[in-house]
Image: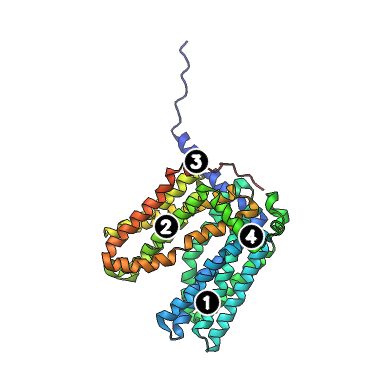
């Protein structure tokens, strides 16, 4: 008898396996939304960001309407940033010592009241720059408490195997809001003035507060060390708790190094993108229209990076964070060599995707490695480290660009980002940073 030959391989099987794997990943991507606590957190977080993306635009037009010109605008915008820098360490301590959900609720309530007050002042017709600066500062101060509490609350509403997916879902929604909300704000301002846009912002904050208040952390908590209020050690005051948070950062060499990396790369990137970018658009691209295309490309890249983080869960956290961060050098280098517009747009898309993937992996790494009762403090110091050198970078970039030229300054910014992003990989501790890859389980 003739031997029975094996059946020929089916060429469609590999494609079927790939489709099945992607379908499984897509199903896993929405698993955290099956938990009521995370659904409320996700919806409240998105609404809060949707309003926050409109507020700066409305305040900018309101400040200009006072007749103060660019100086008034600068005062109002700076008033929203400075309280965050000052109060972030305090916000981290408060979020660790008390219930994070309550901190999130009251932060949104304060912002809703401040934006309502600003809208009423504008409607009254007697608004002054200092009044807008005060309302902007109140919201900035509330944000210093909200951010570490919101990021820390993720460990309380989803289990460990779902945290990275939950972080990616939050970033995805946040970036979609960043892209859509300014357009909505522009329509509102054009149709009815900045007051209506601020009312919209107040409403989103109020609704977010209601959603956060409905989160039952005791029922939703998945880690015992973060389920109950954290009162700190006996005899320790606010200063002592802030110092303890600082020690949590510096006793981990890898964490201190990565915070320093973010400080250098973030400052160089923002100086090149936010400060020199518009100047490049004016001199090379011919105006703001094409620069708007470039900015939209970067936002699209952020959305793509969040989507990638939903589908891909790498374990080598240190390498991914450094690799994603170094991609920020691409747009700066493209502007330095006057790359064609399609290449410039592509560079911004890639940079946005790399940055967002790195941010999701970094946040997931901290949630994995830092004890829950100290997580918000570490998150606040991590954010503070990125923000502190930015004003200095802004002040230095102008004289440097005037002395050495726009393109040379952009080239140096790209070199600084590249070196600072890759240098931490010299340390074995950074190269060995990993996140366990766990299968997501349905609630």
Residue 244 at what x, y percent from top left? 61, 56
Q: How many discs appear? A: 4
Residue 212 at what x, y percent from top left? 66, 63
Report how far apart the C-alphas of labels 3 and 1 lie in the structure: 47 Å
Residue 47 at what x, y percent from top left? 58, 66
Disc 1 is placed on an element classified as: helix
Q: Which residue is mark 2?
A: 264
In front of the other: 219 or 413: 413
Report how far apart the C-alphas of labels 4 and 2 lie in the structure: 28 Å
Mark 3 or mark 2, earlier in chain: 2
Q: Which residue is mark 4?
A: 240
Residue 53 at what x, y percent from top left? 50, 69
Mark 4 or mark 1, earlier in chain: 1
C-beta proximity under 8 Å, tags 4 and 2? no
The quadrant holding residue 137 is bottom right
In front of the other: 419 or 347: 419
Report how far apart the C-alphas of labels 2 and 1 lie in the structure: 35 Å
Mark 4 or mark 2, earlier in chain: 4
Mark 2 or mark 1, earlier in chain: 1
Disc 4 is placed on an element classified as: helix
Mark 3 or mark 1, earlier in chain: 1
C-beta proximity under 8 Å, tags 3 and 4? no
Neighbour tally class for label 3: few under 14, some 14-19, many 20 plus, Cα within 10 Å: some
Q: Which residue is mark 3?
A: 432
Label for residue 197? 1
State which mark lies toward you, 3 or 1. 3
């Amino acid at each position: 008898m003739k031997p029975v030959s094996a059946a020929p391989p089916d060429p469609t099987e590999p494609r079927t396996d790939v489709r099945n794997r992607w379908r499984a990943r897509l199903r896993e991507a929405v698993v955290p939304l099956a938990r009521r606590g995370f659904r409320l957190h996700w919806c409240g977080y998105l609404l809060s960001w949707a309003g926050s993306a409109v507020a700066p635009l409305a305040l900018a037009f309101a400040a200009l309407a006072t007749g103060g010109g660019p100086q008034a605008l600068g005062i109002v915008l700076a008033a929203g940033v400075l309280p965050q820098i000052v109060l972030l360490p305090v916000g981290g301590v408060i979020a660790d010592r008390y219930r994070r959900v309550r901190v999130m609720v009251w932060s949104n309530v304060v912002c809703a009241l401040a934006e309502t007050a600003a809208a009423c002042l504008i409607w009254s017709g007697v608004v002054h720059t200092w009044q807008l600066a005060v309302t902007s500062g109140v919201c900035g101060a509330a944000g210093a408490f909200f951010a570490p509490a919101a990021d820390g609350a993720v460990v309380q509403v989803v289990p460990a195997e779902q945290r990275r997916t939950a972080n990616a879902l939050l970033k995805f929604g946040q970036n979609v809001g960043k892209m859509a909300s300014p357009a909505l704000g522009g329509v509102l301002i054009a149709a009815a003035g900045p007051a209506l846009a601020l009312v919209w912002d107040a409403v989103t904050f109020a609704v977010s507060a209601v959603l956060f208040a409905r989160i039952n952390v005791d029922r939703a908590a998945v880690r015992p060390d973060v389920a109950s209020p954290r009162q700190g050690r006996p005899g320790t005051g606010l200063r002592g708790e802030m110092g303890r948070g600082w020690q949590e950062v510096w006793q981990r060499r890898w964490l201190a190094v990565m915070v320093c990396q973010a400080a250098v790369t973030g400052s160089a990137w923002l100086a090149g993108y936010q400060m020199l970018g518009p100047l490049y658009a004016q001199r090379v691209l011919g105006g703001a229209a094409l620069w708007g295309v470039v900015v939209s490309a970067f936002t699209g890249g952020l959305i793509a990076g969040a989507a990638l983080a939903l589908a891909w869960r790498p374990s080598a956290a240190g390498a991914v964070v450094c690799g994603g961060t170094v991609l920020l050098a691409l747009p700066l280098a493209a502007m330095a060599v006057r790359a064609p517009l399609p290449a410039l747009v592509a560079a911004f898309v890639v940079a946005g995707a790399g940055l967002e993937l790195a941010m999701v992996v970094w946040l997931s790494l901290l949630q994995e490695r830092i004890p829950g009762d100290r997580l918000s403090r570490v998150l606040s110091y991590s954010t503070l480290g990125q923000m502190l050198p930015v004003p200095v970078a802004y002040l230095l970039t102008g004289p440097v660009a005037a002395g050495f030229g726009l393109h040379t300054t952009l080239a140096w910014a790209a070199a600084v980002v590249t070196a600072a992003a890759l240098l931490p990989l010299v340390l074995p501790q950074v190269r060995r940073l990993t996140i366990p890859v766990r299968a997501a389980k349905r609630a």
